[in-house]
Amino acid sequence: MTVDDSRPLAPSAGADGALPGPPAEEYRVRCARFAAARDRLERRLRWVGYGRLLTFCLAAAFVVWALVSGVPALLLGGAVWLAGFIALVYYNERLSRAYRCYRELWRLNDEGLRRLARDWDGLPLPGVTAPPGHPYADDLDLFGRASLCQLLGPLGTAPGERTLRDWLCAPAPPAAIAERQAAVRELAPLVDFRDELALCGRLAGGKRPDPAPFLAWAEGQPWLARRPALLWGARLLAAATCALLLAQLVGLVAYPLWLLGALANVALSQSAGATVDRILGEVAAHAGGLRHHAAAFELLGAGRWQAPALRRLQATLGGSGAAAAARTRQLDRLLRLDYLRLSMFYFPVQTLTLWNFHVLALLEGWQRAAGREARGWLAALGEAEALAALAALAHDQPDWAFPTVEPMAAPLVEARGLGHPLLPDASRVCNDLRLGPPGTFLLVTGSNMSGKSTLLRAIGANVVLAQAGGPACAAALRLPPLVVRSSIRVQDSLERGVSYFMAELQRLKEVVDAADAVRAAGAGTLLFLLDEILHGTNTAERQIAARRVIHHLVAQGAIGAVSTHDLTLAQGPEIAAASQPVYFTEDFRAGPDGPVMTFDYRLRPGLAPSTNALKLMELVGLALGDGAARAGGQTAD
């Protein structure tokens, strides 16, 4: 990436822009480089500011001197200093753009370090949330603080955020996954390109307007063009008024006949002109969904891509991206014509020329020529940003594997070294596991805090990443196309009058209904992840109900994992035959303040041999039963 005073330029997108060494070291080197450029430009901006003040004061001083002394020649000196002031204003704007670029580039790479450290509070929150009622987004931490979306690379536009949200919330077919993986692999080492793409969005401002209102106008029917009499009437009135005014100024007409045209223009402005102003205001307000993306279109279009997905996006933008970028810049120029409506000169210009009619006519010409292509351009940009976000994860975690997602005769999820992607590398413990074939499920037992829920979330999060087209936190992962459903983080609702147990029943019904739907469709496999199933009711009924739910899911051909403290859950003959038991355990050792409990988070075959609830009560000073018994014994004595 070259350093200049206007804007950093990305290298050709097909080149390897990565530095040697681990990702953390690479981010540190880049942070240092961009911080140095940012600070240098900040100092230069300060000196340019002093220079602007000085040249303005000198220009004003020469003008005052000329007026006081009566020497007109001094005005020439004032003009020279005024020219210097104008030049410095232009240079200051150029430096300011460069400063903003390097400031944002430093932030982007600092965020890379924070992603590696899982410093969630130091990272910007995702700009999107899951659709209401999504079946697993909350359970698997897809959005919000400490989420998969926050772990992925930066997104600069609303289309990028929405595309990534859609990819995380719904699985892609195997062919699309393979296509995305190829693009992610190609983009992973291109740190410069990915930074430039994110920079294009961030420099557009903090607001990320919803492009839907603009697209509704762009793809709709022109208002003024469908009223040719009004359009041509406005053109003729404006031409006649200006011609009569010019004729009077040059002496061809003795009377101000142009006032008649001006009165007609005012009348037209007060009637149909109100609708024209409203349309112009709406287009100007919502055009940010496209007008700021020209640089991103050019950047994506300029690459020499190998991945089919990237070539397809490039073609959507017009080959080299020039068509989309040119049309976008043309729209920006047309919208600048509408700025006159905010000026004090608007009324006289409107009175003479019916300015707003002509601006709307030009915009509607753009609407007819390019409006229906704008949605495709924004979709291509959104897809490119989503791919770049997944590529940032692949770059940051080079040891993670790209999963194999393919249909199987006997659906299986086979993972080697699978861990939770949201945990830091230093504290993550990985395990080998296998889910399936249909007719079986993984029964996860173990004591409190041993890692059962984390294992279920790790399975689900990695399946989501795999079916979005990204890398998974595993040494190897193989799976069929899966429909994910979970019941892990269930909440009651005081507002809706729903108890915890009822909320869990409703969630389980969604899982069961999804299994029935997948079985009826005859395509795909349901993956269920159930944590402490039905622990909101008494033990006897919980065991009966849980066994019925699990048996139904297994009978429908679903595969999955169930975690439980209840070691008797697998005692029923049907469940025992289908379960593949694994467990986590803990270790107690002596410490300076008493016994200390530790966990190794290693998965072992079989049922858990022990529980730790009473031990945990003792560790936190809640050994109430023993204390009461001792107190009672002393009293009896």
Image: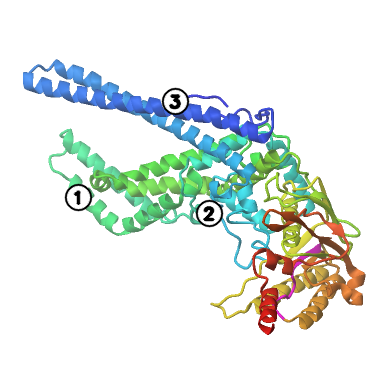
Residue 393 against residue 92 in the figure, above or below: below
- Camera sees residue 252: no
Pointer 2 with pointer 1, Cβ within 8 A: no
Going from the N terminus, do you reach mark 2 or mark 1 first?
2
Position of residue 456 measured from the top left corner of the image (x, y, whole percent):
75, 60
Q: Is residue 203 left or right of residue 189?
A: left
Would you name the residue on which mark 1 appears? 260
Give, as a three-letter code, the residue at label 2.
Glu
Which is nearer the eye, 600 or 500? 600
- Crowdedness near tag 3: few (<14), some (14–19) or many (≥20) residues, C-alpha within 10 Å: few
Model colouring: rainbow
Q: Is residue 233 left or right of residue 242?
A: right
What residue do we see at 73% from left, 74% from top?
508
Residue 136 against residue 569 in the figure, above or below: above
Q: Is residue 43 magenta?
A: no
Q: Is residue 11 left or right of residue 104?
A: right
Would you name the residue on which mark 3 appears? 40
Q: Which residues are magenta?
A: 525-537
How far is the residue under mark 3 from the one under mark 2? 46 Å
Label 2 sits on a secondary structure element that is loop
Would you name the residue on which mark 2 appears? 219
Going from the N terminus, do you reach mark 1 or mark 3 first?
3
